[in-house]
Amino acid sequence: MSGSFSITAMKKVVQQLRLEARFNRVKVSQAAADLKQFCLQNAQHYSLLTGVSSSSNPFRAQKVCSFL
């Protein structure tokens, strides 16, 4: 029984390796450069870098009205 299990397990391993071999690999240096370029291009839309305008900030301090 263990022989047939071993063959089945090895077939799954071979199938997984064939699947992974089809992926297009990118060098880490190229991926890092692409990520850096993307971040720099989209930095103006990132509110933690540019800040939030006071008119569109839902968390701004509310103005208090007082009647005397």
Image: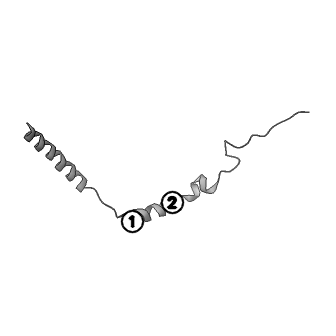
User: Which residue position holds label 2?
Assistant: 39
Q: Amino acid at mark 2?
A: Cys
Which image quarter holds the C terminus?
A: top right
Of residues 5 and 51, which is closer to you in this image? 5
Which image quarter holds the N terminus?
A: top left
Label 1 neighbour load within 10 Å: few <14, some 14-19, many 20+: few
Quadrant of the rendered image containing residue 9: top left
* Furthest residue in direction top, as rendered: 68
Q: Compared to 59, does 39 lie above or below?
A: below
Instruction: Give me the residue at 17% from left, 45% from top.
Output: 12
Q: Compared to 31, does 48 lie above or below?
A: above
Query: Callout 2: helix, strand or loop?
Result: helix
Which x, y percent locates residue 57? 67, 45
Per the model, the C-alpha gap separating discs 2 and 1 is 14 Å
Instruction: Give me the residue at 28% from left, 56% from top.
Output: 23
User: Which residue position holds label 1?
Assistant: 30
Residue 42 bears which disc, if any? none
Instruction: Give me the residue at 14% from left, 47% from top.
Output: 10
Which x, y percent locates residue 3? 7, 41
Label 2 neighbour load within 10 Å: few <14, some 14-19, many 20+: few
* Furthest residue in direction front, as rendered: 2
Q: Amino acid at mark 1?
A: Gln
Instruction: Give me the residue at 57% from left, 55% from top.
Output: 45
Is 38 positioned to the left or the right of 63 in the image? Answer: left
The total of numbered circles placed on residues is: 2
Query: Callout 1: helix, strand or loop?
Result: helix
Q: Earlier in the sequence, mark 2 or mark 1?
A: 1
Rendering colour mode: one colour
